[in-house]
Image (cartoon, rainbow, N blue to C red):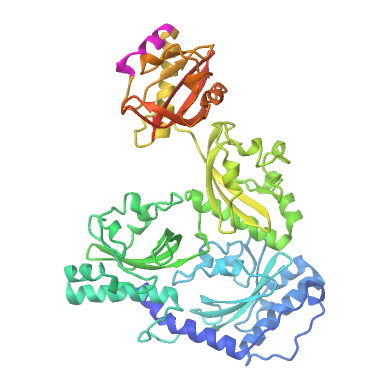
Amino acid sequence: MRNHRILFRLAAVLVAAAVFVSGCYHYMPPHSQMDRSVTKPSRQLSKADRPGYTVAMVEKAIRLHDAKGREATLDYYNSSESVDGEWYIFIADENDEIVAHPNPDVLGESLHGPTGVDITGYRHGEVIASATEEGMWVDYIFLNLASGNQEYKHTWVVRHDGLIFASGWYQILPDLSQSAPTKADRPGYTAAMVEQALQRYEAEGREATVDYYNTPESVDGEWYIFIFDESDRLISHANPDLLGMDLKGDLGVDVTGYRFGDLMLTATEEGMWVDYLFLNLATGNQEYKHSWVVRHDGLLFGSGWYQVQPTLSPAATKADRPGYTVAMVEQALRRYEAEGREATVDYYNTPESVDGEWYVFIFDESAQLIAHANPDLLGMDLKGDLGVDVTGYRFGDLMLTATEEGIWVDYLFRNLASGIQEYKHSWVVRRDGLLFGSGWYQAMPSLATAVTKAQPAEYTVAVVDRALRYYKAYGREEAVAYYNTPESVDGEWYVYIFDEDDQLIAHANPDLLGMDLKEELGLDSTGYHFGNDMVNATEAGLWVHYVFVNPATGEEETKHSWTVRHDGLLIGSGWYE
């Protein structure tokens, strides 16, 4: 529990530091990049004015860059001569990797990696990476090279010419263990909620504690306590509908598919932070939740706060495919803000921008593709053929609805790395009228691999694949005969076969045999002539959705059918909804 007690000690510092900075010094950034190189500080700053001296250090570094160039600037700020007591300049490049710092051990480190996370778990590197030319203050815990201690650092950060220039001063951490954090310090307040729950548990026991945190009175705005038992079942939560659910099951998987529950279960008495998407009861929306979780007496106690704008796990690796995908898009957006449209589009049209199966694609305001790893697709329209996958699904229509908040879109697309059609899970964000996206691929499950009826689409494809294998093994006559028997029916699933003239030759309902797909048989009760679409199926397969009588119920229901053209025949199956 040492880590969250550190948080308590930091809580008042956060608030005090913010007041201190805003009260001591008000910085007016240069009006434009054009006059930055000749702008002089409006007054002599001294080290007694620590915010002012810090800003002056950064301005001096920017002037050196504009006068001497990038290489000379990096050389200087990687030297010990550039260090001025506790003040030094550090610089990060366009990829947010540290390229200048007096501590050579951090050179090459990413602001989104471990170097960008302080001892409390605060991801200051993500905030630093979001800096613009206007500049911003970022406060966090960092090693003071002059003292050799972890201290509170107040850093002024400016993005200039694609680089991040920063400097700061240190403040020794006072012992604030008796100070209660406020909601303005969301990490501190969250840890305090959990600590309070642990104290209640020790004082009142398990039953009373669980009962209390299942009451509305225990909820404090967006903060509430959740508790899992020794079997990882939820026993306390602000939403009673979730009680009894298993953290190892669906409850522990967010809407992106990230299994945050697996990470949460590794929590110890030391506590840990876990970030994921979850329903915010206060707003009714899926939002990023930052939870502090502690293991105690075999139980998991936790609480967290919500963040509306999606932020990325800074240490996202390719093992975390959703997180890595979002990171690719975020990186592209930062490049766009730093270097502009033309340079960004040019970069993402180069092979160097491709990272295995990951690459960034960009559509312009007219939905024309202007950046992609496959140059043959450039200029194609997302509203046209490019936005329709091999099943006929118009994923482009959904993709075009993306906003600055971003959306996930799933569809079939050719994986350049494998050369085959695979499921693609893409994160797409609208920015300045452009669409930025990236995604990862999931190989379509081998249809020889068992799938369950809980996956109706996959199960349907598997049924059709099995029918094709049966046809290839036993021939046309035997296959048609088999799929006209009751034994071939599997609940609501059965195989239908149309011949070269689109006449029905196999079906679970023998009364329909001989009917023509292009005529009445292919017309549903809503007036939709699905048969005209179904006859267009190829060997790649085609999904068609229509109303049809379910032989199992005798009722008209919506049917989702997968149909494949093979040897001139149409072979398909579907499920009812």
- Magenta residues, start to end: 477-488
Q: Is residue 486 above or below residue 279?
A: above
503 or 197, nearer to the observer: 503
Question: Does residue 50 appear left or right of residue 265 in this picture?
Answer: right
Tell me, yes or no, whether the highlighted magenta stretch contains residue 289: no
Q: Residue at x 40, y 67 (%)?
A: 282
Residue 551 picture quarter: top left
Q: Is residue 480 magenta?
A: yes
* Residue pictured at 71% horizontal, 48% vertical: 366
Residue 422 image point, x, y percent? 53, 35
The answer to whether residue 541 is above or below residue 128 is above
- Reply above or below: 387 against 223: above
Would residue 314 be seen by someone viewing this image from the given angle?
yes
- Res. 447 in view: no
User: Residue visible at 55% across and 88% down?
Assistant: 20
Give above or below for 151 relative to 121: below
Q: Position of residue 138 (x, y in %)?
A: 57, 76
Q: Nearer the viewer, residue 43 or 86?
A: 43
Give the x, y percent position of residue 222.
Answer: 39, 70
Task: Decide which of 308, 360 is in the foreground and name it.
Answer: 308
Residue 571: x %, y % from top left? 47, 19
